[in-house]
Amino acid sequence: MSKAIERLKIILKKINFIEDIISEQGNITKALEDEKNSRAAIMMHLTSIAEQFN
């Protein structure tokens, strides 16, 4: 597969992880307020998504 398709798959996977974290916490506000776990995980996945554009 092309690199672009592989990058899109990684981005989709990370978005799904973020959605799962939000669902586990109940909503985005609660997820972001959980600085110890959820917020850090969301930020990690967003960073990973951003790296796909470099």
Image (cartoon, rainbow, N blue to C red):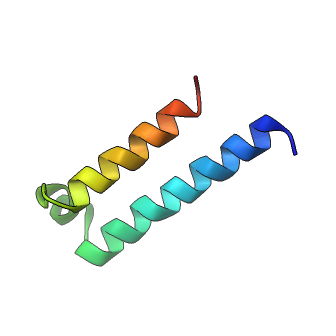
Vertical order, 18 against 7 (above or below): below
Q: Nearer the viewer, residue 54 or 18?
A: 54
Is residue 32 visible to us here?
yes
Q: Nearer the viewer, residue 29 or 47?
A: 47
Is residue 26 visible to us here?
no
Residue 40, percent from left and from top: 24, 51
Q: Residue at x 62, y 50 (%)?
A: 10
Using residue 52 as the reference point, say whether residue 17 is left or right of it.
left
Q: Residue at x 51, y 31 (%)?
A: 51
| Number of numbered callouts drawn | 0
Residue 2, percent from left and from top: 85, 39
Q: Residue at x 42, y 65 (%)?
A: 19
Residue 16, percent from left and from top: 51, 63
Residue 39, percent from left and from top: 22, 54
Q: Nearer the viewer, residue 8 or 26?
A: 8
Q: Residue furthest top?
A: 54
